Image: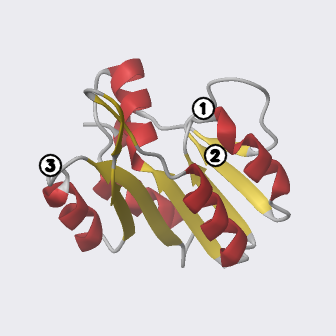
């Protein structure tokens, strides 16, 4: 079994910061399905209101299992929402032989080390050495 777990909020910010572009999710899904036939793709993200509804619908039309939740207010005008634990639990429950982590969050390192099968990381980790093969997000996957 092959599972891809994408932290879309993290990927958005990293790609925006590094390339000032967005990910072309249709191209990404096609690349993952070509390279890993039978892959189950899961996306995780947060929104304050309904601002991501069209994006969520787009991901669903691509056949991605989408997990979204509301952000929480941590201070006046400051909102937080992350899926690190939820994503990690889904990886553990998924019992995949091959795991693809779509996040550049260094907090994913223990999860990557825990995985006993083949692990790939989409993009490049921000800090530390990773024990996984990297799938570099190239210009062909950006828009």
| Residue closest to the eye, 115 or 32 | 115
Residue at horizontal 35 percent and vertical 61 percent from the top: 68
47 in relation to 64, above or below: above
Image quarter in which the N terminus is found: bottom right
Give the mark nearer the N terminus: 3 vs 1: 3
- Could you say where residue 83 lies in the image, as x and y percent from the top left? 50, 52
Residue for badge 2? 121
- Could you say where residue 48 lies in the image, as x and y percent from the top left? 23, 46
Mark 2, mark 3: which one is toward the viewer? 3
Q: CA distance from mark 2 to mark 3?
A: 28 Å
Give the mark nearer the N terminus: 2 vs 3: 3
Check contact, mark 1 vs mark 2: CB within 8 A: yes
| Residue closest to the eye, 126 or 77 | 77
- Here the colouring is secondary structure
Residue for badge 1? 124
| Residue closest to the eye, 126 or 68 | 68
């Amino acid at each position: 079994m092959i599972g891809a777990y994408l932290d879309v909020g993290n990927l958005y910010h990293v790609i925006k910061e590094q390339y000032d572009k967005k990910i072309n999710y249709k191209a990404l899904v096609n690349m993952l399905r070509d390279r890993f036939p039978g892959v189950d793709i899961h996306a995780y993200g947060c929104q304050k209101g309904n601002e991501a509804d069209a994006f969520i619908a787009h991901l669903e039309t691509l056949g991605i299992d989408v997990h979204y939740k509301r952000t929480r207010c941590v201070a006046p005008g400051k909102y937080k929402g992350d899926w690190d634990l939820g994503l990690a639990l889904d990886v553990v429950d998924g019992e995949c032989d091959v795991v693809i982590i779509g996040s550049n969050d260094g907090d994913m390192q223990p999860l990557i080390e825990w995985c006993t099968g083949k692990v790939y990381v989409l993009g490049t980790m921000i800090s530390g050495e990773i024990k996984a093969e990297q799938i570099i997000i190239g210009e062909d996957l950006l828009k």
